[in-house]
Amino acid sequence: MESPISNFYEFTTKIGTSGQPEPEDFTWIKENGYHVVLNITPSYMHYYLEEEAEICKLLNLKYIHFPIDYKDINVENFSTFSNLLNENAENKMLIHCGANVKVSVLIHAYMVLKVGWDEAKSQNVLFKIKYPDKYWNQFYKSLGLNPI
């Protein structure tokens, strides 16, 4: 699927991930059947879009802001992230951060641990989006996943 959003990737028919959408991208999000936008970017980041919640409201998109600092990614954050995905599983959801690095790291873990994807298959998808650095290996190990 072609998208105007930076680093967009459609993991499944219900889950898309990306970097930070521009204000004009939210119309594309709506027109492509997304109903939920999950933003994990902390509000103090320079690329955080302050008007995102209002834009989503105007377009009748459910907006969830669950900020996760990359220095603070842990099992608790993953658990809450997974719960948010599960609670909204009936809806097509766009999940984003600034560059689709944190989101891809989390989605990889989610697809393997919660959806049942083969870990090697999921890593191959992850590498198509971004090749995360070794920083994330401790997080993966804490979940029982293989390091990158």
Image: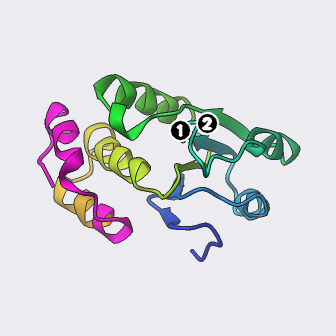
Depicted 3 relative to depicted 120: above or below: below
When asked about the image quadrant of residue 122, the answer is: bottom left
Label 1 Cα crowd, 10 Å radius (few <14 / some 14-19 / many 20+): few
Tag 2 or tag 1, which sits nearer the N-term? Answer: 2
Residue 117 falls left or right of residue 5: left
Label 2 Cα crowd, 10 Å radius (few <14 / some 14-19 / many 20+): some
* Residue 50: x %, y % from top left: 73, 42
**Residue under numbered circle 1:** 89
Q: Nearer the viewer, residue 62 or 50?
A: 50
The quarter of the picture where the C terminus appears is bottom left
Describe the element under mark 1 as helix, strand or loop. loop
Residue 36 falls left or right of residue 74: right
Depicted 119 relative to depicted 10: above or below: above
Residue 115 falls left or right of residue 147: right
- Tags 1 and 2 in contact by the CB under 8 Å rule? no
Q: Which residues are magenta?
A: 126-148
71 part of magenta stretch: no
Mark 1 or 2, closer to the camera:
2
**Residue under numbered circle 2:** 43
Q: How is the image coloured?
A: rainbow
* Residue visible at 61% across and 33% down in the picture: 65
Please tell me the numbered disc located at residue 106: none
